[in-house]
Image (cartoon, rainbow, N blue to C red):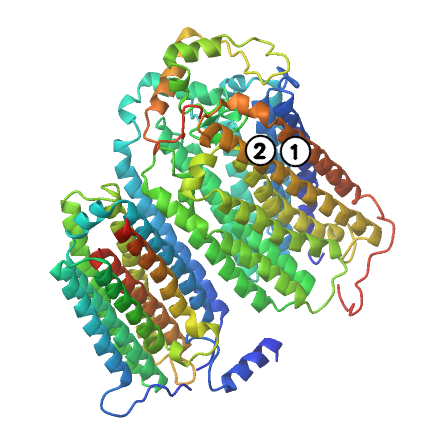
Amino acid sequence: MQYKSQAVAKPYFIAAIGLFVGQILFGLIIGMQYVVGDFLFPEIPFNVARMVHTNLLIVWLLFGFMGAAYYLVPEESERELVSPGLAILMFWVFLIAGALTVLGYLLVPYSGLAEMTGNSVLPTMGREFLEQPTITKAGIVVVALAFLYNVGLTILKGRKTVVSLVLLIGLAGLAVLFLFSFYNPDNLAKDKFYWWWVVHLWVEGVWELILGSILAFVLIKTTGVDREVIEKWLYVIIAMTLITGIIGTGHHYYWIGTPDYWQWWGSIFSALEPIPFFMMTVFAFNMVNRRRRNHPNKAAVLWALGTAVMAFLGAGVWGFLHTLAPVNYYTHGSQITAAHGHMAFYGAYVMIVLTMISYAMPMLRGRSAANSEASQVLEMWSFWLMTVSMVFITLFLTGAGILQTYLQRYSSDPLPFMVVQEKISLFYWMREVAGLMFLIGLVVYVASFFVGSRQPEATAVVEGSAA
Amino acid sequence: MSQAFTKAMARNIFYGGSVFFMLLFLALTFDTHTAWPQRDNHENLTEQVAHGKRLWEENNCIGCHTLLGEGAYFAPELGNAFKRLGGADGIKGFIASRPKDGIPGRRSMPQFNFSEDDLNAIAAFLKYVSEMNTASWPPNIQG
Amino acid sequence: MTAEAAIQQQRRGLAVPRFPPGDLAIWIFILAELLVFALFFAAYAFTRMQHIALFDRYQAMLNRDAALINTLALLTASYFVMRGVVAAREGQGRLCARWTWAAVGMGALFLVVKSSEYAHHLHAGINLSTNTFYMFYLSLTFFHFLHVILGMVILVAVALKAGRGGYTPEEHTGVETGASYWHMVDLVWLVLFPLVYVMK
Amino acid sequence: MNTSFPTRGLIRPCTLVYALLIGLTCVTWMIGRSGVGGPGVSLLVLGFALLKGHLIGDWFMGLRDVRGIWRWVVAIWLLVPGGLIALAFLLSFRG
C-alpha cells in the first residue's frame, strides 16, 4: 500500500463481502420457494426475499466499486485522497441507510414502508431493482455525490491516467443515470422506457467502464505489462462497449409499447454486444501471457482471468442467446432471462469486485503483495467452487427456461404458467443444490481471509523479481 | 508510411464513438416519443388507472409477477391478465379470495386486504396495460 | 526500446505493409461499423422477401435523381480525399488541406440533397413507423447520414491540421486515418444506393 | 514511403478508377430510372456495387499495397452481405 488513505477501501470491501453473504442466503430462500411454494410464507413472502436478494447485490457491488475506487485512485493519481474522513463518513451513511432499508423490507409490509417513507410525495418505489424508498434513493444520490467529489478531485489534482479517467467517467455515468430512477410517469410505456436508462445503461454501459478500468489496473499491477499497451486496449474495448451497448438498449424495447423498429435496431446492435466482452477475454489472456513478472498473488490473477471468461460467457454468450427479437418473442421474461442475469452479474461484476478485493486486501491487511500460500490455495478453491456452481445454476435455469418457453409459449397447446412451473420443478431443485454448492464456495472464500494469516507471504515462482 | 496504433486515436474513437451513438440514441428516443400516442393507450390513462399503477407499485407486485415480461418470474405474466382472467371481475375475485396463510405447499399470493375502490383501480390498470400495443406480445393467452 | 517498438521498426523496413494506411484503432472502428451496416443490409434483403409488393411500391416513390447526385458527391469526395493523402505524402500540406476542404464541400452537398429528401418525406408525414419499407429506408439512410456528418467532422480536423503544416511526408498518419474513415462512409453508400433505390 | 501512386504522367491511374466509378454509377442510375427489374438486372446492379466497393478499397483506401488479411478485409465485407443480398433476391424471384 503506497498511500495511507487507500486504507479507507478496507471497510468498503468488508461490508461488500458481508452483504454478499446475505445476498446468497436470500437467494437460497427464494430458490427454495420456487419448489416449496409456502416456504417461510407468510413471514417472508417471495417478493420480499427476492427484493432483498437483488438489492443486496446492487448495494454490495456499489460498496465494492467504491472500495476499488478508493484503493485505485490514490495509487493512479500518486497522491492521497482529498478527504479520507469523508470517505469513512459516507461509508457509515451508506451502510446504515442500506441496513435500515433492508430491515424495512423485512419487518414492515412493503405498502407500509411506502406510506412511512412518504412515497406518495414522489412515487418511485415498486419498480424492479429500484424498490428502495424514495428517501433511500435520495441518500444514494448524496453518497454518490460525496464519493464523486472525493474521487474526482483526487484524480483532477493528481496524475491523470487512462485507468482513473475511465473509472471516473463510469462512476459519474452511474450517478447521472441513477437520476432517472426518480422519473416514474403514470404512462407505463414511458415508465419502462426510462427505467431501462438506469438498468441497462448501468449494466451494459457505464458499469462496463468501471469493470474495464479495474481489470486494467489489476493487470498493470500483476503482469508488469507496459501501461501504454493496456490503456490503449482499454480505450478500444470500452469504445466498443458503448458503440454497441447504447443502441443495444433497444433489445429491451421490443414488447413494452415502443415502436416496432426497436426490434431491428435492438437486435442488430445487441448482437454485437458480445464483441467487447470477447475482446476483453483475449486482452486479459494476452496481457497475462506477455507478463514481465510472476506476481506472488496468483489468486488475484486467477480472478482477473476468470472475470474475463465468465463475463464473456454470461453477458456475451447468454445475452446473445435470447437477444434477437424473433427469439426474444418467446423467451422474454422466462427463466432464460434469469439464467442470463445470474451468470452475467456473477461473471462481470461479482468477479471484478472479488478480483479487486483479492488484489488489494493483502496490502490493506499489512502484507507487501500477497497472502500466504495456504490462504491463496483456499481462495482459489473458493473461486472454482463458486464459478462452477454458477455455471450449473445457469445451465439448470437455461434448461428450465427452454422447457418453459416451449410448454407455455411455443407448443401448439400452450399450458398455464403454474402448470408449467410444476413440470419443470426438477430443474429448480437442481438449481437449489447448485446454489448450496455456491454457498459452500462462499464460506470457503470467507475462510480464506482467516487461514494462514500468520504464515509467511507467498513468493513468486522463478523470475521472481516481483512485488 | 508507418503503421501506428496509438492511444490518442483509441481515445478519440472512444469519445467520438460514444458521443455519436449517444446522439443517435437520443434521436431514436425523440422519435419514440412522437410514435407513442399511436400505441401507448394513453387515452385510457385515467385517474383510476394511475391509482391502480400506484397500488401495483406500493405492493411490490413486480417482486413475483412479470408485467410485459419484466419483473420476477415466480408468478404469471400480468400484461394480458385482464383477458386471461376474464375481465375486471375475474381479477378482483382472484385477488380478494387469497387465503391469509397461503395454500399449503404451493406458491401463494398474499392477502392484501384491498378495498373495493382499490380492487377496481387495479383491474382498471391491468385493463389499460392489456390494451397497449406491445407488438402482439405475449405470444398467447397463457402469458 | 520496447519489444513492440522494435517490431514496429521492423515493419517499417518491409516494402509491403501488413496493415492498412492510418491508425489501426480507426480500422477497428471501421470494422465495427461495416459489421452493423452488413447486418442492416442483410436484414433489409430478407425482410423484403416477405413484403415484395410493398417494397417495390414505395421504392418507386424514392427520388433516384437525388440519389445519383449523392452518389457522385460521395465518390468525388472520396477522390478528393485520396488526392489529399497523396499531397500529404509528398509534403504538400497546403495542397492536402485544399483537397480535403473540397471533399468536405462534397459532403456538405450530400447533406443538403439528403436533407431535402427528408424534408419531402417529413412533409408527406412519413416516419419510421409508416411501414416496413420506410422503416428500413429511413433507418439505413439516416444512420449513414450521421456517418457522413461524423466523417466531415474528421475531415475538417484533418484539413485544419494540414493547413497548419501539421503533417510531414514521414508522419501523416492522421490524414490516412481520416481518409480511411471517409472511404468507409463512401463504401457503405455504394451498396446502399443500389439496394434501396434500384434493386427490385 | 509508399510509391504506388505515380505522381507524374498525364492521367493518374486513380483518376481513371474515379472515372470508372462515375460511369458505373450512371449506368446504375439509368437502370433505376428505366424501371426495369428482375433477377438479371438486380444482380447486375449489385455486381456493379460490389465492383465499385472493391475499387474503393483497392485504390482509394490503399489496400492494394497491403499484404495479409487486411488486404482482403473490404473484399470479404463486400462478398458476405453481397452474397446474402443476392441470395435473398434470388429466393424472392423464385417464390
Q: Residue at x 29, y 26 (%)?
A: B42
Residue contact between numbered discs 2 and 1, judged by CB atoms under 8 Å: yes
Which quarter of the rendered picture does the N terminus of chain B lie within?
Answer: bottom left
Which residue is at 23% across, 77% downward?
D20
Q: Residue at the left extreme?
A: D34
Assess disc 2: are there few (<14), some (14-19) or many (≥20) residues with their C-alpha within 10 Å of its C-alpha: many
Residue A150, percent from left and from top: 56, 48
Residue occupied by mark 2: A400
Q: Nearer the viewer, mark 2 or mark 1?
A: 2
Under mark 1, the amino acid is: Arg
Q: Nearer the viewer, residue A91 or D11?
A: D11
Mark 2 or 1 closer to N-term? 2
Residue at the extreme front: D94
Q: Is residue A282 visible?
A: yes
The picture places residue A191, in percent across and down from the top left corner, at 39, 32
Among the 4 quarters of the image, the one containing residue C195: bottom left
Residue at 13% in and 58% down: D35
Q: Nearer the viewer, residue A347 or A92?
A: A347
Residues at marks 2 and 1, CA–CA distance in whole angstroms? 10 Å
Q: Quadrant location of residue A17?
A: top right
Q: What residue is rendered at 26% in x and 38% in y?
A: B34
Vertical order, A83 against B85 (above or below): below
Place of residue A425 in the rendered image (x, y in percent of width and height, measured from the top left): 62, 26
Can you give x and y, in whole percent of width and height, for residue B97 in the image? 50, 7
Residue highlighted by disc 1: A431
Q: Is A342 situated above or below A411?
A: below
- For residue D90, side relative to residue A58 (left or right): left
Q: Nearer the viewer, residue A64 or A7?
A: A64
Give left or right: position of A176 versus C115. right
- Are dots 2 and 1 on a single chain? yes
Q: Chain of mark 2?
A: A
